[in-house]
Amino acid sequence: MSTVTSTEYDGPLGPILLTFIDDALVRLDVAHDGIDLARAEISHRLGVVPEPDPSVGDGLVAQLDEYFAGERRAFEVALDWRLVRGFTRTALEATLGIPYGEVASYGEVALMADAPRAARAVGTACASSPFSIVVPVHRVVRADGSIGEYGGHPEVKEQLLDLESRVVLGERLRAAG
């Protein structure tokens, strides 16, 4: 029997609920409408109420701290894909190939996913990602370069892109001496 646990992370984007099945992340929810609603939603989707366990996400919490401090570019956490099906998973996995500090259009991600005519499906996949931040769907933009809605919270996407741009720019300036 699997163990379903969750922990809360208070970061610069506000409260985040991290839910795990055994040791794998099943959902990272930037809880715009509050932790209680996020917990109720994941409980409904999984059919079980996650047990609060602050220690379960210690590794990911440390990685999130590093990411928001500009010290981490990618996450090392096992992902439980049970809430993701079909092409959505393919598209989300393709976003892992977008370098830190860079963006790709929905059409470019469709090409990366070997489905060149699926730009809209990529948008749907990104909007439904259960792994916000960890799987970098925030790096996917519209063909005209505008950032899009990001689940109704474009300000969050803008914060993440700005953070990564500032880190990359700082590194380039230091390298240029």
Image: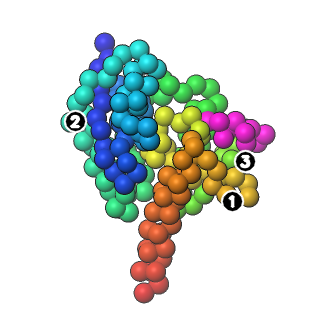
Check disc 3: other Cα within 10 Å, few if <14, some if 14-19, many if 20+.
many
Check disc 2: other Cα within 10 Å, few if <14, some if 14-19, many if 20+.
some
Above or below — where is 61 with respect to 68? above
Residue interval drawn in magenta = 113-125
Indicate the amino acid at tag 3: Gly
Question: Which callout, 2 or 3, points to the residue nearer the camera?
Answer: 2
Residue shown at the point (74%, 58%) measured from the top left = 144
In the rendered image, the residue lying farthest to the top is 1
Q: CA distance from mark 2 to mark 1?
A: 39 Å
Q: CA distance from mark 3 to mark 1?
A: 12 Å
Indicate the amino acid at tag 1: Gly
Identify the disc placed on residue 107: 3
Say left or right for 119 vs 140: right
Q: Which residue is mark 2?
A: 54
**In the structure shown, which secondary structural element does the residue marked by tag 3 occupy?**
helix
Where the N terminus falls, by quadrant?
top left
Indicate the amino acid at tag 2: Pro
Residue shown at the point (44%, 68%) measured from the top left = 167
State the image coordinates of residue 170 (x, y, percent, origin top left): 44, 75
In the rendered image, the residue lying farthest to the right is 117
Q: Which residue is mark 1?
A: 145
Q: How many marks?
A: 3
**In the structure shown, which secondary structural element does the residue marked by tag 2 occupy?**
loop
Above or below — where is 174 with respect to 81? below
State the image coordinates of residue 53 (x, y, percent, origin top left): 22, 30
Where the C terminus falls, by quadrant?
bottom left
Check residue 115 for magenta coloring: yes
Q: CA distance from mark 2 to mark 3?
A: 39 Å
